[in-house]
Image (cartoon, rainbow, N blue to C red):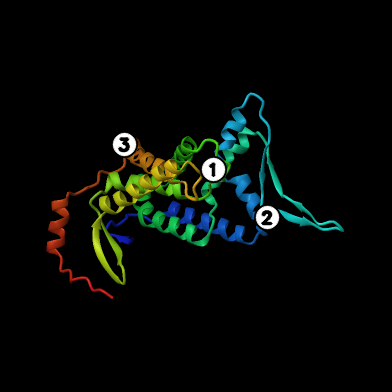
Amino acid sequence: MFFPFHDDNPTRRTPVVTFGLIAVNTIAFLWSTQLPTLERHELNLTHGFIPARIGQVTAAQPAPLVLPAGPPMRRPGPIAEPVQPLVRLPASATAVAMSLLTCMFLHGGLWHLIGNMWFLWLFGNNVEDHLGPLPFIAVYLVGGLAASACHWLSEPSSTVPVIGASGAVATTLGAYLVTWPWARVHTLVFLFIFITIIDVPAVVVLGVWFLGQLMSGHQALQAGQAQGVAWWAHVGGFIAGMGMMPIVGRLVGAPKVHRGTPAHMLRRRRNERVEDAEWW
């Protein structure tokens, strides 16, 4: 197991959009945690992306999608009857389109939020610095939409709401990979009871991450059932970032970057006075 925590890739300007995205996601999560459990379920159903809603709005005779908002409850009264709280989602193309956007700012738990925001900060600040604030937010949001589309292609009939910034964050990872593949990433490595810090090229860190998502997505398809993680959204977002970064960079006149080579990285390593890693 490994955990990247810093890269040797300085920025020239303050990443205001990256800061803003982290702030908005954090505020949205803290607000959602104050809601009662049933209302939080309704929030995810209404503003999360549900793949089955695409078929709902494209049907010849669109009808509301009725989904359970939570576990059955007991209705108060002399005869306690079980009642299933339901949410009726209208067949509205506008509502579905909005859910594709709002789903990127909802998270299912604290660690879900922390993981996404950490990777956004670690790699997104350089992508924003390279493209500029407005092109970066455009790439981020379009990549998030591409991620949702990829998830829909893998599970078009799923009624499980998809929430989280993972697909959009994966876009920044793909964008970073094609621009700075040999940037050094300081990585915390866990080997059983031992922990060490090593410098790893970004192509290794992000490549291993991508292969993990690809393998998990393949296993999910083989299982033939809805999974707790939208693996193919991660894959789709990552590929979208790899494809958009060079195109958008040329369109906005982004400065050329020195991508380096493995040999260049090794020379830099030899020229620096680096002590052996300590284990603890």
Q: Amino acid at mark 2?
A: Leu
The reply to whether callout 3 and callout 1 are in contact (CB within 8 Å) is: no
The disc placed on residue 38 is 2
For disc 2, the neighbor class at 10 Å (few under 14, some 14 to 19, many from 20) is: few
Q: Nearer the viewer, mark 1 or mark 2?
A: 2
Q: CA distance from mark 1 to mark 2?
A: 22 Å
Report x, y in % for residue 173: 36, 49
Tag 1's secondary structure? helix
Q: Residue at x 31, y 68 (%)?
A: 192
Instruction: Name the residue carrying label 3.
Output: 250
Q: Nearer the viewer, mark 2 or mark 3?
A: 2
For disc 3, the neighbor class at 10 Å (few under 14, some 14 to 19, many from 20) is: few
Q: Earlier in the sequence, mark 3 or mark 1?
A: 1
Report x, y in % for residue 132: 38, 46
For disc 1, the neighbor class at 10 Å (few under 14, some 14 to 19, many from 20) is: some
Q: Residue at x 55, y 52 (%)?
A: 106
Q: Amino acid at mark 3?
A: Arg
Report x, y in % for residue 35: 66, 59
Q: Is residue 23 left or right of residue 171?
A: right
Q: Is residue 16 left or right of residue 30?
A: left
Q: Nearer the viewer, mark 3 or mark 1?
A: 1
Q: Residue at x 43, y 41 (%)?
A: 221
Q: Earlier in the sequence, mark 2 or mark 3?
A: 2
Q: Amino acid at mark 1?
A: Leu
Q: Residue at x 39, y 42 (%)?
A: 218
The reply to whether callout 1 and callout 2 are in contact (CB within 8 Å) is: no
Quarter of the image with the C terminus is: bottom left
Tag 3's secondary structure? helix
Residue 135 visible in the displayed image:
no
Quarter of the image with the N terminus is: bottom left
Instruction: Name the residue carrying label 1.
Output: 101
